[in-house]
Image (cartoon, rainbow, N blue to C red):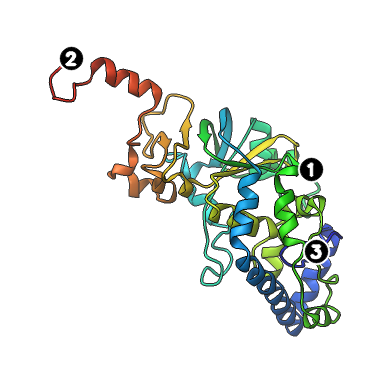
Amino acid sequence: MDPVVLYDWANPQQRLFAKLTKLLRRRSDLDHRFRAYHSRYHMELALQRRAVKKELDAALSYGCISPFTFDRWQRTIRWHYSDHPLCTIGSLAAGGRFNVGRNIDPSVFPPFSAFYAAVDKDTALQEALGQDTFGSGLDARELALASSHSIVMFSVKGKLDHVLDLRDPKSIQEFVDVIKGFKLSRGLAREAARLPVVTPSVVKTVKQLLGSLLNPNWRHVPTLCEIPANSQIFGQIVAQAKIEGILYPSKLTERDCLAIFPCNFVGGSSFIELDDPAPMTLVGPKRIDATNWEACERSAADVEHSPLRRSAISSPAQTQLTTVAGSSPAGRPK
């Protein structure tokens, strides 16, 4: 197994995951030491990341695309959220690849949301429903099509001021150059020798980092260890660097996906907008930008009678309409 950048975790193969899960459930003493070990692993590296935060922020900014525009991309959400399709509340339940959810102790790991979209419908569907194939006997596409969840798909467009492009290995080379010098304590290695884990280590190459971030079995970590997966912690680092999104290839279709952090729209020109005419039943906003990004993290009921329901920044079409039919600055009709 390749070393990981933030903490160790169980072998990603499904059969070993199942074996380890069964073992930990049967032995509560081992389960306690297993979780304590991973918490210590996480903390040792978290302290080192904190000491070089400015360097990490600069390294990530260097690898960004600026700006990045997208059109006719697809978003898959549960039917429950269909009257507010631009909300990110769903990502807070169990978390997504690049955001931490409430399924992990929020007093230790504060949750943060993300808006996910993909370049086509097949990718959006598999990313949303085809990730967990454990014990199903189906591949990702079959699992997505066989899902009993009621879902809705929307076409979206937008512009992001800064996007970290994981499709290009060079985008994270400087980040790796900073973290590859991190050190782990001898005590951690001694504890690992007494547990069903590999020897603790940190990432030394871009290939290792990408393998960790795009691992299809990333949910094993929060399930077994009650700490965020590597990709979730990386998403937190990117979001805290004030970068608006992460562009990455789907491990299921190899097509492009986006994880967007609307909280970073403040002070910029980034936006997300529904491509098609909205239905009469739409409650949430059709557009999210710097002026109403908080609507993403609120329910349809919360935004229905709120100013957040409308963006204060006009789209080009709205601007043209105002110019033609609006009032002059002095209040007199043109």
Q: Position of residue 297 (x, y in %)?
A: 43, 51
Tell me the number on the disc at residue 334: 2
Placement of the C terminus among the 4 image quadrants: top left
Along the polypeptide, which appears first: circle 1 or circle 2?
1
Residue bearing the label numbered 1: 139
Q: Secondary structure at mark 3?
A: helix
Placement of the N terminus among the 4 image quadrants: bottom right
Closer to us: 328 or 33:
328
Q: Is residue 145 left or right of residue 70?
A: right
Q: Position of residue 97 (x, y in %)?
A: 65, 52
Tell me the number on the disc at residue 17: 3
Along the polypeptide, which appears first: circle 3 or circle 2?
3
Q: Position of residue 94 (x, y in %)?
A: 59, 57
The 10 Å Cα crowd at callout 3, few under 14, some 14 to 19, many 20 or more, is some
Closer to us: 225 or 283:
225
Q: Residue at x 22, y 20 (%)?
A: 326
Front label number (3 vs 2): 2
Look at the picture and state if 129 lies above or below 156: below
- The amino acid type of the residue labelled 3 equals Phe
Q: Is residue 207 left or right of residue 43?
A: right
Decide: marks 1, 2 in contact (CB < 8 A)?
no
- The amino acid type of the residue labelled 2 equals Lys
Q: Residue at x 12, y 20 (%)?
A: 332
The 10 Å Cα crowd at callout 2, few under 14, some 14 to 19, many 20 or more, is few
Q: Position of residue 203 (x, y in %)?
A: 79, 60
